[in-house]
Image (cartoon, rainbow, N blue to C red):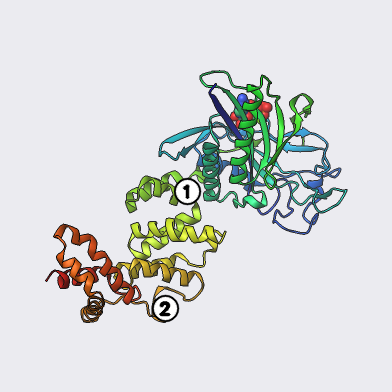
Amino acid sequence: MMWETVIGLEIHVQLATKTKIFSGASTAFGAEPNTQACAVDLGLPGVLPVVNEEAINMAIRFGLGIDAEINKVNVFDRKNYFYPDLPKGYQTTQLDKPIVGAGHVDITLANGSTKSVRIHHAHLEEDAGKSLHEDYHGMTGIDLNRAGTPLIEIVTEPDLSSSEEAVAFAKKLHSIVTTLGICDGEMSQGSMRFDVNISVRPKGQEDLGTRTETKNLNSFKFMEAAIHKEVARQIDVLEDGGRIVQETRLYNGDTGEARSMRSKEEANDYRYFPCPDLLPVVIEESRLEKLRANLPEMPDAKKIRFISDYSLSDIDADILSGNQATAAFFETAAKLSGNAKLTSNWVLGEVTRSLNANDTTIANSPVTAEMLASLIARIKDNTISGNIAKKVFEAMWNGEGKDADEVIEKKGLKQVTDTGAIETMIDDVLAANAQQVENYRAAPPEKRGKMIGFFVGQAMKASKGKANPGMVNQILKKKLDD
Ligand code: ADP
Ligand code: MG
């Protein structure tokens, strides 16, 4: 039987506000445990929450950024449950009147086609604290610094049909929230966490299969692996005549193991009710207008502009526009160097390769956009060849010069374009390879094109790669064919 995968995502995005959603406590990452939770975050008796206006603005910006409806009256609810990392006894969230209504996010697939993924809604809520199991043998540590951190939870329709699509969507969402500046995008710090709902069904069947939910994936890699594993498990169960139990599952990215956490049958009744301490949020049209007017250029618009302004291919424009920092790096270097095509090749080639090899990000690249532009300018004006440029790049990467000119000067890499010097070098090469010269001259013209490569190689080697390859070719032809 052929199976079809159906995936819907729920994504928790930490909003980049300075303070908590209902208190003035700091949201900064990495503080000593339990130094950033105040009486409001702990829900001590008698405290009253005050909504952080900036959290509301950021949620609205998200909605506007993906062309979604904004619910001009939205309501906070209490979701009641007991857990050690939730001393309040309830999470303040939004149940059926969320701030952001239906919208869509478009993704580009590997084959170049576009798919529109429907967003069901996005709601505001507070994060809980953190239970720390690793460092306390036989005990659990509780860090409440995260309690009250503002989140938006984004819920998609079950529109995704493979791990590739899910990852493409996750990356696109990352790009959208970082472009909007509403989230720092630091996945390893938990700034974006993905819950993945997965089901399978026989190909052609209309009804959805029973789904499981794998919670709290915080890297694209883990997400992809977790989906593969769960899809395979579900197909195995069904093909063995079993049935899928609707349950919440955990995936451990470090060990690659997955297990059931709780089944839906024993799911809690959360006794939701509107929070009596918070008024409904009413959003004026004038506020929407102001926020709309201040939206940055979104990734889709940027992609279209890159194609028209810089004549980039669709796929190159997609990658370059897909990450805010990469896009800015590319544009700065393209403008300074005056050659967008070469810049695009270098950003997608050497720069990306070096970043990956060193496990770092473009924001921390030792070669800045300005330095790359200086390199491209020297390729363009024939000071260095493409091959030497790679050496210059490597040297700049290793901190051996503030720009290309300094490295070229220091290492003596300047391209030789002096006709006399190249001729002397070529004469030496021809003298040292008399037999090959004879063979070449005896060969029919249609074979010579290939044979000349040997001499070019020798001449380039003799010049340590510094001779201008075009001139070497030209002078060699002249000398050999005469
Ligand atoms: P609940 O009310 O139990 O939270 P929802 O209907 O809100 O369930 O759906 C939660 C998430 O699960 C959404 O992202 C939705 O797209 C996804 N989803 C729902 N049904 C399925 C299914 N059969 N297979 C895969 N994903 C699903
Ligand atoms: Mg739900």
Identified at 72% across, 44% down, the residue is 127
The quarter holding residue 473 reads: bottom left
Query: Can you say which quadrant of the picture contains the N terminus?
Result: top right
Residue at the (80%, 42%) spot, across then down = 86
Q: Earlier in the sequence, mark 2 or mark 1?
A: 1
Q: Residue at x 77, y 46 (%)?
A: 129
Q: Is residue 442 left or right of residue 243?
A: left
Which of 438 and 482 lies nearest the eye of the viewer?
Answer: 438
User: Is 4 situated left or right of 254 in this image?
Assistant: left
Q: Is residue 342 left or right of residue 255?
A: left
Residue 371 disc label = none
Q: Position of residue 454 (x, y in %)?
A: 27, 67
Instruction: Give the label, 2 or 1, closer to the camera.
Output: 2
Examine the rendered structure and indicate whether residue 367 appears above or below residue 182: below
Residue 67 percent coordinates (x, y): 49, 37
The total number of labels drawn is 2
Q: What element does badge 1 sit on?
A: loop
Residue 404, how many percent across, how many down? 41, 73
Q: Quadrant of residue 227?
A: top right
Location of residue 2 with respect to 283 vertically, above or below: above
Give SS at disc 2.
Answer: helix
Residue 230 visible, this orientation: yes
Task: Tell me the tag on residue 406.
Answer: 2
Instruction: Determine if residue 97 is in view.
Output: no
| Rendering quadrant holding ligand 1 | top right
Numbered mark located on residue 322 in the image: 1
Q: Quadrant of the C terminus?
A: bottom left
Q: Say which amino acid is labelled 2.
A: Glu
Horizontal and vertical percent position of residue 25: 74, 53
Sort mark 1 into few (<14), some (14-19) or many (20+) by Cα contacts within 10 Å: many
